[in-house]
Each structure stands twice: as C-alpha cells, then as structure tokens.
Image: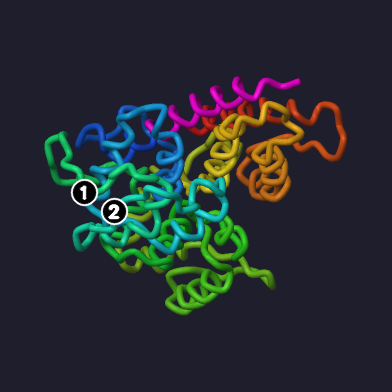
C-alpha cells in the first residue's frame, strides 16, 4: 500500500522548488534577470494559487504573495483566478470560519472574494511588509504575461497575444489556446477572429482553424531586419519539444499546478487508506481529464483504470513525470 504521507511530502517539495524558481523568474528576489533562465513564460495566477496552497511549508511565501498584492494588485486577472479555483482542491477555494476581515484598502479589496476563504484567517493583505518596498521591475522574458498586461491591460486579448507570440510561426487551434490560458472557448474564438481581422494574426487551414503570428505584418511595423534577427534569436532547437519552436512558450502550468495541488493534499484529511481518500481519486480523474493537454505539452503522466493493482503507484509516477518534465524545460 502506498504511503500517502510520503507522496504528500514529495509533492510539496517539488511544488516549493517550482514556485520559488518562478517567483525568481518574475524578479521578486532581485531586480535583475533570474539566476536560471526560463524557457517558458510564467502563469501568474496558477503560480499564486499553488503558492497559497504550499505556503505552510515555507513561511517566506506569505511575504512574497503579500508583497506582490500590495505592490501591483492591478496586474492580476480576477477572471482567470476564479476560473482556476474550480480546478484546485475544494478546501482551497471554500470559505471557512475565521476568514480574513473584509476591511481592506481600496485597490486590495478586489482580492477579498478570491483569497479570503483560502487563507482562513491569515491576514495576507493588510499587514505591514517588513521587506523594503521597491518598484517592480519586470526585466525577465519569463515575465512576459505581466509585461504585456502593463502595456495592454489585464484582459484575455493580452494573454492570448502572449501565447501566440510564444509559439512564433507554430499555429495553434482555439482549443489549444483555451486549454492553456484557461479562458472560455467562445472568448478565445472571438478574440482570435478580431486579431485575424487586424492581419496581425494569421488564420490557417480549414475548420478547425489554426492561428499564428503574421510575421509579414509585424515586419511592416518594426522592419524586416529587426523581426528577422528577433526570430533567429528566439527560435531554436528545444530539448522539450524536439523541434524548432519559440523559446518563451506558455506551457500548461495551470493543469500541472492543479495536479500538484491535489498531490500535496493527499495526506491532508487523515485518510490513510487511498481507497477512501477523495484527493487520491481526484488525482486519477485529473490525469484522465487533462491527458490530451499533457501529451500536447510533452508531459507523459501514466493513467490507470478501474481495479488495476498498480493504480496507486500512479501517485509517485505523477511526481516523477512532472519533475522530469520540469527539469527538461528549465
């Protein structure tokens, strides 16, 4: 029988490594480029939710989240946070007794419906931050989502454009974009139609259409030499995909972080028997539900069905697969 305490400890250790790497990539630890370059952009909302979930394993995470919320609360998408919450463990988004006091200052009040229940009495917002305040400097390519929001505002159009820029000339379908960015398919389709009408984005093939950046249109704006040199610098052979593709892709962080979230909670409710543990079964369901997205991003998580005697080994296999995948794209 699998040891759920061991599974939870391994999952939390991996989650902590990933969230600290990504906060570093956003430039929290120092106002200069990250110590380790990233091959993908950071999904800020998925990162925030996973950090909240594992905050008890490292008290410094509270300071990180508090600093970001106080420094630039307007850079985060409430729409994406609400959509992501439904794919994380239920207790994470459910309100409980002793939640935060709703007495928050103006620009911080928008966070209350999202994190009040999750933090359950921990005043993430409103307490003084001991760290010296400084202006956010989004210098790293991995912070492209937040940098784009500074330019274009917090909206699905900005995020979808970042996704397409990350893929370069590699086209993507509406479903692929919606699954990765966690926006509604109808919203993504409408925005892509508008971007295609602007001729800055190409619509390719027959239905289902695929979309990519129109390099010719961008060359007219910035000049052919600038775009050519930029593409040559950003497109290269990547170990993860085994083909030429853009170096700053938006990977399936929302689905991976949700999987890690369930794995970190398998030992949270005291159910030592995996058969009776709802979070263990949630891991099985999540692997099956997101299997297509994982495969598209070259993350091969095994799936077991029914009464297969090896099915609980899936818990350790998931952690191994995510760790190997993360190491490959780092």
Looking at the rendered image, the quarter that the N terminus falls into is: top right
Q: Is residue 105 above or below residue 296?
A: below
Number of numbered callouts drawn: 2
Of residues 260 and 252, the one nearer the viewer is 260
- The residue lying furthest to the front in this view is 97
- In which image quadrant can residue 129 be found? top left
| Residue tagged 2 | 101
Circles 2 and 1: CB atoms closer than 8 Å: yes
Q: Position of residue 163 (x, y in %)?
A: 47, 56
Query: In the image, what residue occupies the spot 56% across and 36% down?
Result: 260
Left or right: residue 244 versus residue 77 is right
Left or right: residue 22 versus residue 209 is left
| Residue tagged 1 | 126
Magenta stretch: includes residue 161 = no
Magenta stretch: includes residue 4 = yes
Q: Position of residue 101 (x, y in %)?
A: 29, 53
Query: In the image, what residue occupies the spot 41% across and 27% down?
Result: 57
Q: What's the magenta bit mostly, secondary-structure-wise? A: helix
The disc placed on residue 210 is none
Q: Is residue 81 above or below residue 37?
A: below
Earlier sequence position, callout 2 versus callout 1: 2
Element class at badge 2 = loop
Read off the magenta span: 1-20
Left or right: residue 94 versus residue 209 is left
Element class at badge 1 = loop
Query: In the image, what residue occupies the spot 55% across and 33% down?
Result: 264
Q: Position of residue 189 (x, y in %)?
A: 55, 72
Q: Could you classify mark 2 by the number of other residues whose Cα lies within 10 Å: few (under 14), some (14-19), or many (20 or more)? A: some
């Amino acid at each position: 029988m699998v040891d759920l305490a061991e599974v939870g400890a391994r999952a939390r250790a991996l989650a902590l490594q990933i969230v600290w790497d990504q906060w570093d990539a956003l430039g929290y630890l120092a106002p200069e480029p990250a110590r380790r370059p990233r091959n993908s952009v950071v999904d800020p909302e998925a990162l925030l939710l996973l950090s909240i979930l594992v905050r008890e394993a490292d008290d410094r995470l509270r300071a990180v989240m508090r600093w970001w919320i106080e420094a630039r609360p307007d850079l985060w998408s409430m729409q994406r946070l609400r959509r992501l919450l439904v794919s994380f463990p239920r207790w994470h988004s459910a309100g409980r007794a002793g939640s935060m006091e709703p007495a928050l200052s103006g620009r911080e009040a928008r966070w209350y419906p999202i994190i009040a229940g999750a933090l359950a009495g921990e005043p993430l917002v409103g307490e003084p931050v001991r760290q010296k305040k400084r202006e956010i400097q989004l210098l790293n390519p991995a912070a492209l989502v937040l940098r784009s929001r500074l330019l274009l505002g917090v909206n699905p159009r900005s995020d979808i454009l970042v996704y397409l820029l990350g893929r370069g000339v590699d086209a993507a379908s509406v479903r692929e974009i919606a699954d990765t960015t966690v926006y509604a398919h109808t919203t993504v389709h409408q925005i892509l139609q508008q971007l295609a009408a602007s001729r800055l984005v190409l619509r390719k093939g027959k239905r289902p259409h695929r979309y990519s950046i129109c390099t010719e249109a961008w060359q007219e704006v910035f000049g052919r030499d600038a775009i050519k040199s930029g593409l040559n610098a950003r497109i290269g052979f990547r170990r993860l995909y085994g083909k030429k593709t853009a170096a700053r892709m938006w990977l399936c962080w929302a689905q991976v972080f949700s999987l890690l979230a369930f794995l970190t909670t398998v030992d949270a409710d005291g159910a030592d028997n995996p058969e009776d543990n709802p979070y263990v079964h949630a891991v099985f369901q999540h692997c099956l539900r997101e299997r297509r997205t994982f495969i598209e991003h070259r993350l091969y998580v095994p799936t077991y069905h029914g009464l297969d005697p090896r099915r609980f080994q899936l818990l350790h296999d998931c952690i191994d697969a995510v760790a190997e995948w993360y190491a490959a794209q780092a």
